[in-house]
Image: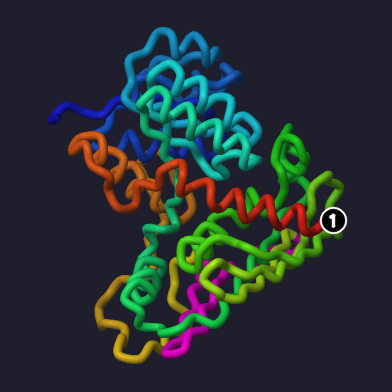
Amino acid sequence: MNSKIKFAIVGCGSIGKRHIAVLDAEPEAEIIAICDLDEKKCIELSQLYNRIPYYTSFDKMLAEIKADVINVVTPHALHAEMTIKALNNKFNVLVEKPMALTISDCEAMNKAANANNMKLWVVKQNRHNVPVKLAKDTIDKGMLGKIFMVKCDILWNRYQGYYDESPWRGKKKEEGGALYTQASHFIDLLVWWCGDVVNVKANMETQNHSIETEDSGNAIVKFSSGVMGSINWTTCVYNKNFEGSITIIGEHGTIKIGGQYLNKIEFWDVRGYPLQEGIEFTDKPNAYGKYQGTSSNHDKVIKTIIDTIKNNIVTTGAVEGFEGMRCIDAIEKMYKAAK
C-alpha cells in the first residue's frame, strides 16, 4: 500500500490540535476531515490547514467520509461511545488517553473492534521516550535482576482556572479524576514493566481546588510480578510543575527517569549496562510549523499506526485496546480502594 493513510479527527481542543499538526507534518498521512461541536474551532483549524473539510456532527462525518482511521480526541467520558460508534461504522480507531473511564467501557470497545474486524489503538506516546525504551530493554533482558520496588511521583501544578475554563475538567462523570488525566501515562508504564495491579491501598483528597475530583493522592500497590509500588500524585504544587518521575529499584540496578515528560534519565546504575555515550536522551519539544507544543512523541504513535496498516502487521509501539485497558483496570482499582 503506497497511498497515504486517511485520518479524520473528532475533537479540536488542545490535544486535538496536536493530532492535526502531527498528521499534517506526516508525509504518509492525509487529514480528510475534522469534527467538533464548536464550529468556530473547526473553521479556525480548517483555514489553518488548507481548508480541511469540517463537521459539527460526528454522525454526519461518519456517514459521509472514507477514512482509514478515526482519531477520537474528545473529553474522557465520550471516548467509549464515540469509539464504538466509529468501529460499528467500519473505521479503525486511535483513541486518546484515557481509553475510557471504566473497565466495562473498555471491554465494550474491544468487543466492538473484534465484532467489526477493525483495529482499536490507544495513544501511549511516552512508551516511545528514549529513557523509557532503555528501561524497558533492561527489564526485558533481565539486566536488573529481581525488581523489588518502583516509585512514581507526579507533583504538578494546575491552577483553578485550568478547571474553571473547561466544561469537563474536575468533574467526576466527565473527567474521572487526576489519575485519568495527569497520571495515566505513568501508570501505563508501571503496568507495562511490572504487570497488572493485584492489590491496592489508597488515600485521595481534594485539598486546594473547587472541583469534584481529587487533586491529591497516594497509593501503595502490588503488581502481579511481585513488585511493590508507591504512587504519589497532586495538582497542588505551588506555581509550576515540580516533578514527574519513576524510580526502579532492582537487584542489579537502579534507574530514575524524570524530566518534564519522562524524557530525561536522572539516575542510571545498572550492572553490565552502562549508558552509551552520544545518545540523545531528551526528546525534543514538538514544533510542527503551525503548532508549538510540549514534548511529545505523538508523531511516533502515528508512524506506528501507519506502518501497521500499510504492512498489515502488529508494529511495536502500536498499543492495541486489550493492552490499553490494563492501565484503566489499575486506575479503577485505586479509586475503589480509596472509597
Q: Nearer the viewer, residue 45 or 4?
A: 4
Image coords of residue 262 (percent x, y):
49, 66
* Boundaries of the magenta span: 236-261
Image coords of residue 226 (percent x, y):
56, 74
Q: Is residue 333 above or below residue 305?
A: below
Who's the residue at 55% across and 31% down the image?
A: 108
Q: Secondary structure at mark 1?
A: loop
Who's the residue at 53% across and 56% down the image?
A: 185
Image coords of residue 274 (percent x, y):
31, 87
Who's the residue at 54% across and 82% down the image?
A: 148
Q: Nearer the viewer, residue 140 or 52?
A: 140
Residue 208 appears in the rendering: no
Q: Amino acid at mark 1?
A: Thr
Q: Is residue 207 above or below residue 163?
A: below
Q: On the picture, is 263 further left or further right than 222?
A: left
Image coords of residue 181 (percent x, y):
63, 49
Q: On the picture, is 231 further left or further right than 194?
A: right
Disc 1 target residue = 206
Who's the residue at 35% across and 79% down the image?
A: 142
Q: On the picture, is 288 further left or further right than 264?
A: left
